[in-house]
Image (tube, helix red, strand yellow):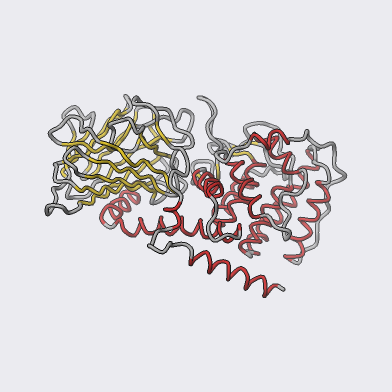
Amino acid sequence: MLHLLFLLLIGLLAACVRSSDTGDGQALSDLYPHILPVGCLSDSLPPVPSPGFTDAGAWFSFALPDSLQSLCGFCGPYSLYAPLPTAWAQAAVTLTAIHVPAVPYRLHTLCHQPGLLRIEATLPDGGWVGQQLLFADATTALLRLTLRTAAPLCLTGTGWHPSVRLTQEGHCVVARRADRTDEMLVLAFPPDVSLQLVPDGSNYRAQLPPAEASGTDRQIVLSISLLTGHTPREAVLSRVWQLTQWPASAWQQSRLRWQGYLQRLALAVGTPRPDRSQVQALTVLASGWRSRREGLLHGAILAPVTGADSLPSLSADAGFVQAAALSLFAPQLAQSQLRVLFDYQQPDGSLPCRLTPSAPVACGPVPTTHVLPACRAVEFHFLHTADTAFVAEMFPQLCAYCRGLQQAGGAWPPMAARAEGASLARLARLLGRPLPPLPAAPMAAPPAAAAACDSLTVTQPLGAALLLLQACTSSTLPLLQGAWLDAAVADNL
């Protein structure tokens, strides 16, 4: 039976790989334009857009300009770290003509597709410019400009934050903020770009090289990096230099990573091409990812900042549901999500209900009350990876989690003790270990959350996770059956 299941999975994977490119060589990610609204609706310095475009665990994001603007560049970057996330600039890199104060661009393509932002515009002389932005890693985004015009053009910043001061270091522009002493923005330009600061140091001007021949395309690649006090600066700057010199490899790696996400999702839902809502959900989860920083020992999906004094936080119950969904298309991210949750496990085995990355303590004293999402997340990860070593790593922590809940006297959903027992028993049999004693009979259940479930949208991380789990759940693992799901949603909206 296991051999037949293995052959079936291999067949589905092969079908997904064959369908990853269309007949004309179009990639799967190209089939989902305008996947999420990441527009910036103000000419002035805007607040952080929601959800914004970010990827690869980065703590900064970008947005698309309003189609009515003359701004030819991506809005941002926006620092996503609390306590007060704001824009570094309206647009740190914009394209303009050397001899004309404001070029009347005609923006005709503003597109967010999985893993990529894209702008295309025409010039008054009939020329064409294209810009594409993606994340090479958690600290650096790459901007590729394709120019089909003989007009002399240059790059400059627009609407810098009032506290920003610029310096030039070689072919890099370094921006520092008086109110963000732990962060530094670095714009790295290729050596054939003529770079200089304006006399008062409030902006820069990067003149692009002329076209080599009439009618040929010029291509320029530069990098935008947000460094923190915990980032090894020299190592990052060395990598940034390599990226600007040889960008093709990073571009291909990002494209292949998103192709892999989509192929795994197609395999999980059993269709050659996932539908748009499923890809939206995948994009939301991937965009919610943040790499390790300060108290975060691993990467995790953090909740959006809800107030000026709030820190990005992680909901434990929702985090386990998101980890289960991440295992569909990004198993390594799912492992990191589970590990960061158990980093906060208390000596008695319990977990706080909300966690912050800046300190290894809870936002509040109330412990989380649902063990089943954690058990099922580990089960679901094993179903999609067959990684018994990770199950062995998580099993003692799950058992301690059950004991901690019993001692905390939390409210259990109906039949939760039986469900947790069945889940732990399956994991114990998988590892060949004895099953530890389980908590006593369940207490009263939390209120039902049917109305809360109806209000979820795909642009919320928890809603995105639930949508993906609903799409791929089969009789082999009835992940969504039981009252634990309603309770988790009710606690974390």
Question: For this rendering, which residue is in front, 364 or 196?
Answer: 196
Q: Is residue 209 above or below residue 266?
A: above
What residue sits 38% from the left and 37% below the top? 64
Q: In this view, does 289 lie to the left or right of 131?
A: right
Residue 477 location (% of width, % of height)? 72, 57
Q: Which residue is drawn at 25% across and 55% down?
A: 245
The residue depicted at 40 percent of the width and 29 percent of the height is: 41
Which quadrant: the N terminus?
Answer: bottom right
Residue at x-position 47% and y-position 44%: 35
Q: Position of residue 488 (x, y in %)?
A: 70, 40
Horizontal side of 100 relative to 162 (left or right) equals left
Count of all numbered marks drawn on residues in the image:
0
Q: Which residue lies furthest to the bottom in this view?
A: 3
* Quadrant of res 410: top right
Left or right placement of residue 151 versus residue 138 in this view: left
Q: Which of 214 and 262 is in front in this view?
A: 214
Q: In which quarter of the image is the C terminus?
A: top right
Q: Closest to the observer: 95 or 432?
A: 95
Q: In which quarter of the view is residue 5 placed? A: bottom right
Residue 280 image point, x, y percent: 52, 46
In depth, the one of 53 and 111 nearer the eye is 111
User: Vertically, is 4 above or below 144?
Assistant: below
Residue 38 image position (x, y, % from top left)? 44, 37
Image check: 291 left or right of 217?
A: right
